[in-house]
Amino acid sequence: MRLSRARRLRAALLAAAGAVGLGFGAVSHGRSEAVSMRFCPGFAASSGLRPVAYEGRVAADPRLTASGMTAWELELTAAVGPDGARATASGRLSVYARAAKRADTGRGRPVRGQSVAVEVARGIKDPRVGFGAWTDALASRSAFVDAAAVVALGPAPRLEGLRARVRRGMLAALAEAGGDAGPLLEALVVGVRDDLDDALADDFRRAGCAHILALSGQHVGILAAFVSVSLGFALGPFRARAVACALAAVYLYVVGPSPSVARAVTMFWLSSAAASVDRPQSRLATLALAFVIAVALSPESAYALSFRLSYLAVAGLAALGPGFELGLRRWAPPPASGALSAGFAALSATAPLSVATFGVLNPFSPLSSAAAGALVAALMWSGLIGAALVALVPAAAPVVAFACGLPYRALRSLMGLAAGLPSLAAADPPARSLLAAVVALAAAFVYAWPYVAYHAESRRRSPAGQLRLPLGPVLPARGPRARDAQEVRPEFPRIGPRQAPHRRPLRGRPRPARLGDRARHRLDDP
């Protein structure tokens, strides 16, 4: 049996796509293996020299840990021995320094892209293991030092210095405009949680809403909407969206390419490009293309927990969101059902991985997230508008702080109430696996139920013989033929067989009048 040309073309495209996918996977796997084996401490073990200091470049913005230490990620370039000998080193080193809060925003402190030297008097520690083969292989070594052990070797690059000044300016404007809500605004807009109250952060964590504090698609969407609304009336929707894409790139550079922010900005770029050429794509297609781009640029990032949770959450919104919304719309209006369905879809997709990792599941987190979403949007909008207003009119700071304090206090009360709700905990691995399997099966049921219900309802409403094929051959549908109208409407006049259009009557012999002659010759009734 020979296949048609369209089927052969489709089979060839599928084979080419499979070959490209396998090649892309092999290349990404090889690059990940190269990254996992590139750590070199600088001196061989047989030399008897132990490095007392390392030099490298700051790879990411310093952050404040839960224990109050400042963490840096260094890309190593050299190792220094006790006698001053230097050797080339490679790999990443996580440095934890005992320092005050906001160390990364103070002047004179190392920033991203700056070269530093770190004295490691206690040596470096091996990475923690037990989180999976690839996670253990890609984990970086760590060193615990004092604040004075981190010394800048030179000024930061000019572009990175400008970025650091812009970042400090954003933090200062949000702190001045937000008042008591300033630390939370810094976490929601810039991703800096150094000054955030520990009790409030713990309430977010116990309520299952810790993802609100992490920069994600919700925050990027609010910022893009803010830019579109601000510039749409002056530039038009197309130019405003283009400006929003450019500002999203600047925002990504300023706050840092974390997996969730990079994914959100990439999807915003792709969806904007598809809309500009009038080819809108589904959310799953855009997510898949963003995943391919992210893995192509950094294959090792796909093994990070934050990367997996971010992409699983969006995949759950795209695949499970319609099923949850279909079931919840019977009991809730569309805005509430949409917010609740988004929370349940994200929880269903990420819960198996989070339960297997942390062993805790808060079943009320979708309700808390839906209620907190409006408050977070109100707080971010008031903070952004207030920061711009305070920059123009500094005397308006008390009024702006009062306006930001209203959603902040409501959000804080909501998180305190949600933190007291019961949650499910599984300590041993078998219990975690069982709980993760239950959540995964529930999500699969929600996804499959609309299709099963539709199929069952269509079978129930169909007559007994409607789905049966005739015993004889099935003929293709024919077009209209002569006298079809007379068979349907008997009152129409009967006409004889039609002559071929090329045949004409003989000369000298009149042709009998036929139907339509009156209209052709423009004859009127007497």
Image (tube, helix red, strand yellow):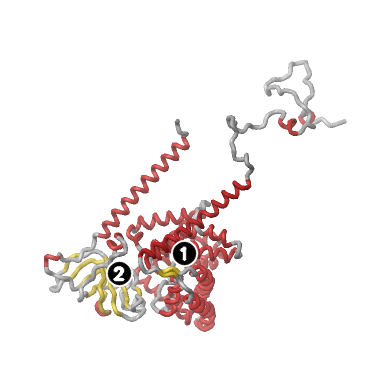
Question: Is disc 2 surrounded by few (<14), some (14 to 19) or many (20+) residues within 10 Å?
Answer: many
Point 53% across, 52% down: residue? 278
Is residue 261 visible to the viewer in this orientation of the structure? no
User: Residue 469: x, y in percent?
Assistant: 59, 36
Secondary structure at badge 1 equals: helix
Of 509 and 222, which appears nearest the observer? 222
Q: Residue at x 57, y 58 (%)?
A: 326
Q: Quadrant of residue 487?
A: top right
The residue sitting at 20% across, 73% down in the picture is 123
Provide the residue designation for mark 1. Answer: 347
Front residue of 165/279: it is 279
In the image, residue 30 above or below residue 340: above
Q: Nearer the viewer, residue 146 or 384?
A: 146
Nearest to N terminus: mark 1 or mark 2: 2
Figure check: 292 above or below 365? above
Q: Amino acid at mark 1?
A: Leu
Q: Determine whether the residue tagged by mark 2 lies in a helix, strand or loop.
A: strand
Query: In the rendered image, is residue 42 in sight?
Result: yes
Q: Which residue is mark 2?
A: 73
Q: Residues within 10 Å of mark 1 (few under 14, many from 20)?
A: many
**Residue 76 x/y as whole percent:** 24, 67
How far, Cα to Cα, is label 1 from label 2?
31 Å
